[in-house]
Image: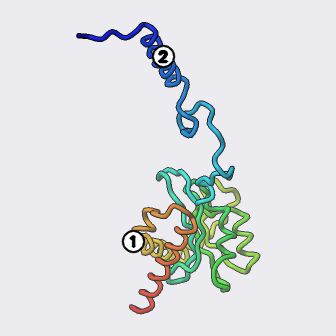
Amino acid sequence: METVRPLEQGRRIRGLLRHARLHEFVGASDPDVRFNHRARARVGRRRQRGQEAQALGRSRGGFTTKIHAKSDASGDIIAFDLTGGEAADAPHFETLLNIGPDIRPRAAICDKGYASKANRAAARARGIAPVIPHKANEKDKPKFFAKTLYKARARIEQGIGRIKRFKRVALRCEKTARNFRSIVSFAAGLCLIKFVHTA
């Protein structure tokens, strides 16, 4: 025999279901901020640190980090600076002159990315001969350029190539700039040790 529920009990169940359905559309429970239409501030109220502080940026090559390196005459990296991939080279020329061992180079050999009158003047003020090719749109270009001396820049490119053989350097596996700087320093040190012991 089938039991029939009283009319009042049926109304009560329908009311509960209707009430639950209403909460489903309004929003989730308070602890879950992701689904809540009134999102709150993060716990601790600290500012989120973005990619700007971690030497990351978008360039034509994708999401990258740029290594501004300073090397000796043999192409071994003796100092470097990190910036995001979209950063221009020219503003970091003076930084490269200031960092590294306390030595006074006779020439600063750079590519066109570092070309500017201010950079050439900064190098001359330190008693360093700037060997930086002039850009095509530069005005008052001198006719003479030390092409033979500029060929030594290939050694710097070879030094960067040796460092990029390390997978963690080439792929930027580290999340923070501090950790990536440590890995690049370690790779540069290993390259220097290997070069010294095989020479």
Residue 98 in the image: state x and y as whole percent: 69, 76
Q: On screen, 198 above or below 7?
A: below
Judge by depth and name the residue closer to the eye, 143 or 103. 103
Residue 26 in the image: state x and y as whole percent: 55, 24
* Identity of the residue furthest to the front in this view: 1
Locate the C terminus and report the quarter of the image it occupies.
Answer: bottom left
Answer with left or right where residue 72 lies relative to residue 7: right
Amino acid type of the residue tagged 1 in the rendering:
Arg
- Residue under the point 53% across and 50% down: 58
Residue 161 in the image: state x and y as whole percent: 43, 71
Q: On screen, 14 above or below 184?
A: above
Q: Disc 1 designates what residue?
A: 165
Q: Earlier in the sequence, mark 1 or mark 2?
A: 2
- Residue under the point 58% across and 69% down: 110
Amino acid type of the residue tagged 2 in the rendering:
Arg
Residue 154 in the image: state x and y as whole percent: 47, 73
Q: Disc 2 designates what residue?
A: 18
